[in-house]
Amino acid sequence: MDMNEKPKVEEKEVQEMEVQKLPDTKEGRLVAELLEKAPYAEGSVRRERRIEFRVPKDEVKNFLRLASEKFEILLQITVVDWLKEGEFEVIYQLWSVSENVHAMVRTRIPRDDPRLPTVMDIWPVAETYEREGHEFFGVIYEGNPRLGPFILEPREYEKHPLRKDFNMLGYVKMVYGEDFDRYDESKTNYVI
């Protein structure tokens, strides 16, 4: 074998090495158990009582269904706008009452066609979080029948104001006119 050539590692050995990196704690065992059932995901222990998974968008619903066996509560679904990468990161925060562990499940979707399946059939409370993600970022949760105006007024509904490329000042001027411009006392900063 050439000195510059890397030794070949079998796929099974790679998976075993990844499992060995996990600590021998309840968190490590939870991650290992889920990764055994879902080899497409990546998982890690962040610290005591905190674990994290990265899942491809096509597998996120399958993974969440598996995770729901141990994580009984969906705490939140949130969206992060990675404008420069052209993606949204959708984060599902889960809580296991039985294990006393918090899990974050992350997936990335394209900004130009942000679609994910609903998880209302797994956790009914997901309806509220999905409606919020749809209204503020434009993420379409396929299968959620109540995606529509929720918090914002009808004139604001299609604007998705939490996207990083949303022009807040332009929007305020369009809706309220030029007289709405206000400055702070030093006349240097906008106050809106």
Image (cartoon, rainbow, N blue to C red):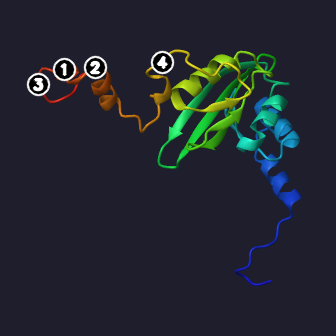
Asked whether the residues under the numbered discs 1 and 2 touch, taking CB atoms below 8 Å apart as contact, a structural biologist would say yes
**Is residue 92 positioned above or below 113 on the image?**
above
**Secondary-structure class at tag 1:** helix
**Distance from the alpha carbon under mark 1 to that under mark 4:** 23 Å
Q: Which residue is mark 4?
A: 154
**Distance from the alpha carbon under mark 1 to that under mark 2:** 7 Å
Observer-side mark, 4 or 3, equals: 4
**Residue 3 falls in image quadrant:** bottom right
Q: Nearer the viewer, residue 64 or 30?
A: 64
- Pointer 1 local density, CA inside 10 Å: few below 14, some 14–19, many at least 20: few
Q: Which residue is mark 3?
A: 186
**Distance from the alpha carbon under mark 3 to that under mark 2:** 23 Å
- Pointer 4 local density, CA inside 10 Å: few below 14, some 14–19, many at least 20: few
Q: Nearer the viewer, residue 120 or 14?
A: 120
- The type of residue carrying mark 4 is Pro
Asked whether the residues under the numbered discs 1 and 3 touch, taking CB atoms below 8 Å apart as contact, a structural biologist would say no
Asked whether the residues under the numbered discs 3 and 2 touch, taking CB atoms below 8 Å apart as contact, a structural biologist would say no
Extreme-left residue of the structure? 186
Q: Which residue is mark 1?
A: 179
